[in-house]
């Protein structure tokens, strides 16, 4: 049977490849990337097709009909109900069919292909003062085709409605190959226009026979997304076939083009934040604000918002956006709304006019679909009842009943969402791993469906029914209307070839759960995974698929890093989500069958820069750098490694050995032998070899100490990291100069433990042992046994020296991040590790924490450059920004990743991607900076990348300050 299935798959792929000009693949990696969306469900497709145009779609449908294989249209895969998963052929529209065909500002319409990303349309329309009204939180990566398939909404639906309200005309292909142009209105016979005769007559007959049911069977509420919107076909509603097909989840036709409405965007927006005692009070108040004509009314409670700054007193908040023709008008409208709301019992309010402040608060809301997947105690929470909606005036009572139902079933969740439209989002701590937990999930789902219907609501208020809710549609609509849905589906898709198992004759809501094939017990791993109870499967499960890592552009004013490799390639397998999906399938063992030896996972992780950006920027804290190190450790266990792992992975050893012969090594690096050496070491031929310091930082340090004892002051331990010590000792010398000027006493740790934890003395001879190491290069190449050994040696030496509360000052951000996170997570069994991690300080943090009264020299010049990605992700740069401000260094550093990323950009085969990452933010920021701008980059990799690719050298902040101190002394 397995052989027959493989043969059929090969034949299908062969025929598709012959018929379609776009990419066709049945490779394990490509199928694995499409097994899941952002829901609880998983299905394994037979093949993936990326059509280039409508003709390709028609060809793919023809081949699938001939083979009897179903088809699933897919956009960005952010659907939360399972409708973007399927067992047949997945049509991936994100690769090619993403043109904005035309945009007519006068008519306020645009014609788009299904793969157009919403933010791209908004940007094009924004040039004319227009926008596309619906704006789900995934606006930076979701596609118009997916939005039309789900009838997506977003936070501005109180002003501009759902996607169905913005659709004017749809061009589709049925599974049978019929071409449809669906719009509004009827022809001479009273039938919808734009249909082939079979469908035209069938639709008219169905509607004419069921007028009474269509007029009485649907609840009247703004967020009714469930089921087919067949009431849009009523004559009094204009026989709007485009509206009826919007939200059909790819079960009736495959969209190839859409004409959509654009709306005028206000010239100014102001955010009013209203505080309430609790979420019930906020829910009760939300609908009372609608007469003020807000653009948004979003609700969040304290358990989701956490310690966000800028919020008034309260236990829950409404975010209400007001527009105006000018900032003053928008602010006045916001103030008037706040006064009216205060009369009804707010606990406080704030009016946020600053765009940066508004963005910071909206980011909390937009990230909620990810952050809500973890409860305050770290336990997992899942979608499934993500977006029920009730009439807005019923929201308060519904929310109270909803909370009671959660308690009755022993479940927890954090409600938030579109309170102005009566739509609640929530992730619930379902146990979807065990039979009892799954039974509870099913029982709760039935009870909640009854509750929603009792309040006059819709099972789906935004994300569609998919598999999550379609089974329960009879509770909402009754068997007669659900039967009509089936007849409508059969009319359009008699072969049941489009997205079977969704909406009509659906699979059970507890079938196809994506967790079922995962190992029942934790797999043996090296890292501790403290936030996932040591379970690698749980760590991988963190990725719920909201795909923030698929952002192709960095938002204005954002310092986000994630995901540089995806932005460079645009390939799903190079996104954080894609890699997490491949790891999930590796653990499942069905599609990816080689376990830790999987070439598919290896290839996807090969272009991961280990920038750690996902650790902070991913709403659920996926840590792909750690997962990559874990995978590489197991993948190469007992096997020969790539040359780069021996050369750059063990760089601290080589640099220590080469230090005495640095002049000779530097001379050889300028000869033709360098090319041979690079080839043998796995180094990219395009990369110059960095020059070794002829005097290491530690050698300079001991020479200086013997010549002059250190000044008095509070002792701080200065970490002589490998890069500072051997490649940029000037940074270490500058840091010593600044720390001493600030009244501190920097000392270097010895290379071996001293008796009683004594500090090294000036007369102490230099030990010939290798210097201490954070283990970074070993971790990044997956040599975790060696990393653990060097980290334990570091602990042995530093633990007694740090006992007195001394900080460990680390100048290289990547090394600081390794000591702060990698060391305690790799040495999870060593109680000394968290204490060392807690002692780590950056250069700026040390000055702020231990020399708070010191005033740096004033430089009064602009800056450009980059915050190191590891610092952004692990350490934060708030202290650096404050230090720069005190020194008169103005402007912001760019986000993103420089692309060199330690060994990554030096490895053969990575050069082009490395350059592309640098061109994303760093190089443009430096090129656009004015003459006289100080170029800052605390990371050795960032400075090296600029040396290789730019024409303006960068310096560590310590160097800039030290130079200014020298000028002041002169």
Image (cartoon, rainbow, N blue to C red):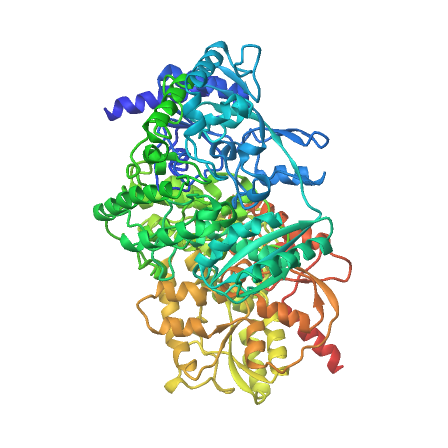
Q: Pick the quarter of the image with the C terminus.
A: bottom right
Closer to the camera in the image, 417 or 235: 235
Percent across and percent down for residue 320 are: 58, 53
Could you tell me which quadrant the N terminus lies in? top left
Dividing the picture into quadrants, the one containing residue 404 is bottom left
Q: Name the residue: 44% across, 48% down.
A: 394
Which residue lies most toward the right here?
931
The image quarter containing residue 188 is top right
Give the residue at the far left of this rendering: 436
x, y percent for residue 110:
64, 30
Q: Is residue 494 visible?
A: yes
Q: Position of residue 722 (x, y in %)?
A: 51, 66
Q: Is residue 225 left or right of residue 323?
A: left
- Residue 315 position, x and y percent, is 47, 64
- Visible residue check, residue 866: no
Q: Looking at the image, which residue is at 58% across and 63% down?
A: 349
Is 205 rendered above or below residue 513? above
Q: Residue at x 38, y 54 (%)?
A: 400
User: How many labels were placed on the picture?
Assistant: 0
Looking at the image, is 621 positioned above or below residue 245? below
Q: Nearer the viewer, residue 354 or 901?
A: 354
Instruction: Name which residue lies at 44% across and 14% down.
Output: 205
């Amino acid at each position: 049977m397995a052989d027959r299935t493989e043969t059929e798959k090969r034949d299908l792929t062969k025929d598709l490849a012959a018929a379609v000009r776009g990419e066709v693949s049945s490779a394990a990696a490509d199928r694995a990337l499409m097994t899941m969306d952002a829901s609880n469900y998983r299905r394994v497709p037979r093949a993936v097709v990326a059509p280039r145009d409508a003709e390709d779609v028609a060809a793919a449908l023809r081949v699938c009909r001939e083979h009897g294989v179903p088809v699933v249209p897919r956009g960005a895969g952010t659907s939360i109900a399972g409708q973007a998963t399927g067992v047949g052929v997945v049509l991936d529209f994100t690769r090619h069919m993403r043109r904005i065909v035309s945009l007519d500002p006068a008519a306020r319409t645009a014609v788009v292909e299904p793969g157009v990303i919403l933010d791209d349309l908004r940007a094009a329309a924004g040039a004319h003062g227009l926008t596309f009204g619906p704006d789900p939180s995934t606006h930076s990566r979701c596609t118009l085709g997916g939005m039309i398939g789900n009838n997506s909404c977003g936070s501005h639906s109180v002003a501009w409605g759902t996607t169905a309200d913005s659709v004017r005309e749809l061009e589709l292909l049925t599974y049978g190959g019929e071409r449809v142009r669906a719009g509004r209105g009827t022809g001479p016979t009273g039938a919808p226009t734009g249909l082939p005769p079979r469908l035209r007559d069938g639709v008219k007959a169905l509607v004419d026979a069921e007028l009474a049911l269509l007029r009485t069977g649907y609840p009247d509420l703004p967020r009714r997304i469930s089921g087919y919107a067949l009431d849009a076909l009523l004559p009094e509603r204009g026989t709007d076939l485009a509206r009826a097909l919007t939200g059909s989840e790819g079960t009736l036709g495959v969209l190839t083009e859409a004409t959509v409405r654009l709306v005028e965007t206000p010239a100014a927006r102001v955010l009013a934040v209203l505080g309430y005692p609790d979420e019930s009070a906020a829910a009760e108040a939300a609908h009372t604000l609608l007469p003020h004509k807000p653009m948004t009314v979003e609700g969040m409670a304290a358990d989701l918002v956490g310690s966000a700054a800028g919020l008034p007193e309260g236990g829950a908040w409404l975010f209400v956006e007001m527009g105006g023709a000018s900032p003053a008008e928008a602010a006045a409208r916001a103030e008037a709304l706040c006064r009216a709301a205060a009369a009804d019992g707010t606990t406080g309010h704030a009016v946020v006019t600053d765009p940066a402040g508004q963005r910071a608060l909206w980011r909390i809301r937009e990230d909620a679909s990810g952050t809500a997947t973890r409860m305050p105690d770290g336990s997992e929470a899942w979608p499934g009842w993500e977006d029920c909606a009730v009439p807005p005036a019923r929201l308060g009572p519904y929310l109270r009943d909803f909370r009671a139902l959660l308690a009755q079933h022993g479940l927890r969740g954090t409600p938030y969402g579109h309170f102005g439209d009566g739509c609640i989002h929530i992730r619930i701590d379902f146990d979807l791993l065990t039979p009892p937990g799954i039974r509870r999930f099913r029982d709760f789902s039935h009870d909640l469906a009854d509750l929603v219907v009792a309040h006059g609501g819709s099972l789906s208020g935004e994300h569609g029914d998919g598999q999550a809710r379609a089974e329960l549609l009879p509770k909402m609509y009754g068997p007669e209307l659900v039967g009509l849905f089936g007849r409508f589906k059969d009319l359009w898709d008699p072969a049941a070839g489009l997205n079977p198992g969704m909406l009509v004759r659906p699979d059970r809501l507890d079938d196809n759960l994506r967790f079922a094939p995962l190992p029942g017990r934790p797999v043996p791993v090296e890292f501790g995974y403290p936030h996932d109870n040591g379970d690698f499967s749980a760590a991988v499960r963190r990725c719920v698929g909201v795909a923030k890592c698929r952002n192709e552009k960095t938002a204005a004013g954002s310092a986000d890093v994630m995901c540089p490799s995806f932005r460079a390639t645009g390939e799903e397998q190079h996104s954080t989500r894609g890699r997490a999906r491949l790891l999930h399938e590796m653990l499942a063992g069905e599609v990816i069958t080689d376990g830790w030896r999987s070439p598919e996972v290896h290839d996807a992780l090969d272009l991961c820069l280990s920038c750690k950006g996902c650790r902070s920027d991913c709403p659920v804290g996926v840590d792909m750098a750690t997962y990559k190190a874990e995978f590489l450790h197991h993948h190469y266990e007992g096997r020969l490694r790539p040359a780069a792992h021996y050369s750059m992975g063990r760089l601290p050893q080589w640099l220590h050995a080469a230090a005495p012969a640095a002049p000779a090594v530097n001379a050889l690096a300028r000869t033709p032998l360098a090319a041979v050496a690079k080839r043998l070491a796995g180094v990219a031929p395009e990369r110059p070899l960095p020059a070794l310091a002829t005097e290491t930082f530690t050698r300079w340090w001991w020479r200086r100490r013997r010549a002059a004892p250190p000044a008095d002051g509070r002792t701080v331990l200065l970490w002589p990291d490998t890069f500072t010590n051997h490649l940029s000792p000037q940074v270490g010398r500058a840091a010593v100069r600044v720390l001493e000027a600030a009244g501190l006493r920097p000392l270097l740790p010895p290379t071996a433990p001293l008796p009683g934890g004594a500090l090294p003395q000036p007369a102490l001879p230099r030990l010939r042992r290798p210097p201490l190491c954070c283990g970074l290069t070993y971790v990044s190449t997956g040599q975790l046994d060696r990393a653990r050994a060097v980290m334990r040696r570091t602990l042995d030496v530093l633990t007694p020296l740090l006992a007195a509360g001394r900080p460990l000052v680390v100048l290289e951000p990547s090394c600081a991040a390794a000591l702060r996170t990698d060391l305690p997570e790799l040495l999870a069994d060593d109680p000394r590790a968290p204490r060392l991690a807690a002692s780590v300080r950056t250069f700026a943090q040390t000055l702020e924490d231990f020399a708070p009264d010191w005033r740096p020299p004033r430089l009064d010049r602009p800056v450009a450059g980059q915050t190191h990605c590891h610092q952004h992700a692990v350490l934060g740069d708030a202290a650096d920004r404050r230090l720069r401000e005190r020194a008169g260094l103005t402007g912001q550093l760019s986000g993103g990743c420089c692309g060199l990323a330690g060994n990554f950009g030096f490895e053969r085969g990575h050069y082009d991607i490395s350059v592309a990452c640098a061109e994303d933010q760093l190089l443009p920021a430096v090129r656009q900076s004015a003459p006289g701008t100080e170029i800052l980059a605390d990371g050795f990799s960032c400075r090296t990348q600029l040396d290789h690719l730019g024409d303006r050298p960068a310096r560590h902040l310590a160097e800039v300050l030290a130079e200014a101190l020298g000028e002041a002394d002169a």
